[in-house]
Amino acid sequence: MLNILWPIFIIISYAYACFSGNLENINNGIFSSCNDAIQLTITFFGTITLWCGIMKIAEDSHLSEKLAKILKPLIHFLFPDVKNDEKINSEISMNMIANILGLGNAATPLGLKAMKSLQERNPTKDTLDNSMAMLILLNTASLQFIPTTIIAMRVSLNSINPTNIIFPVWISTFLAAIAGILAVKFFIKIGK
């Protein structure tokens, strides 16, 4: 669908720019946006690389196993189908920790790794099982205590106070996570 919408938007924008005499502005906007995108990518690349490295050190030093033990009661409640699989529990806990630290982009590879492990044990390969749905929900809600990615973005855009969004992020991500967990648990219950 987006493969159809984007070209339509681009064609309409260029046609409007030609007829309104703003073709120079649209060309300038394209080049300045490309420059801004590259600068933002470089900023995020450093942050993501740092946190992916820290998460890899945590995994190699078995810190992830210790953190998985702390999160074990929560993981058993959220993922009762895989509570006896230590490998999956560890992968899910690392993904949850990365999300809690606000490392949305760095949490993605960890989430994909956990999803791959869940898919391997999924008997119906073309349908999500309950644990996979819960993992998607937790990554979408992304409960965050330190919204690192948003703070980095605000710093790159020269925000006067880039950390003043922390309290609203806590409220919104907590409420989103609770509402999502209740919804998934409800649908799992009525689906049985």
Image: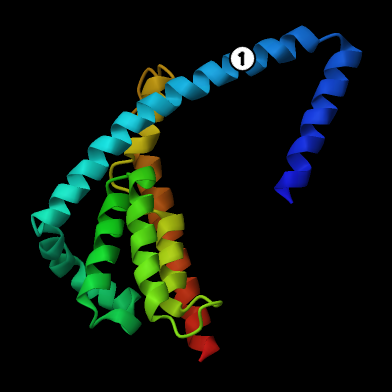
Q: Is residue 63 visible?
A: yes
Q: Is residue 135 left or right of residue 31?
A: left
Residue at position x 87%, y 14% in the image = 18
- Name the residue type under label 1: Phe
Q: Nearer the viewer, residue 58 or 117?
A: 117
Q: Is residue 79 left or right of residue 67?
A: right
Image quarter for residue 137?
A: bottom left
User: Is residue 74 shown above or below 123?
Assistant: above
Q: What's the image's color scheme?
A: rainbow
Q: Nearer the viewer, residue 181 or 91?
A: 91
User: Is residue 140 shown above or below 22?
Assistant: below
Q: Where's residue 185, x and y in %?
A: 45, 78
Which residue does the numbered mark 1 point to in the structure image?
31
Q: Where's residue 171, x and y in %?
A: 39, 49
Residue at position x 78%, y 45% in the image = 4
Q: Nearer the viewer, residue 179 or 36?
A: 36
Q: Is residue 164 visible?
A: no
Q: Is residue 1 left or right of residue 114?
A: right
Local SS, label 1:
helix
How many discs appear? 1
Residue at position x 81%, y 37% in the image = 8
Residue at position x 71%, y 47% in the image = 2
Q: Where's residue 79, x and y in %?
A: 33, 76
Image quarter for residue 86?
A: bottom left
Q: Within 10 Å of the Cα at label 1, are there few (<14), some (14-19), or many (20+) other Cα atoms?
A: few
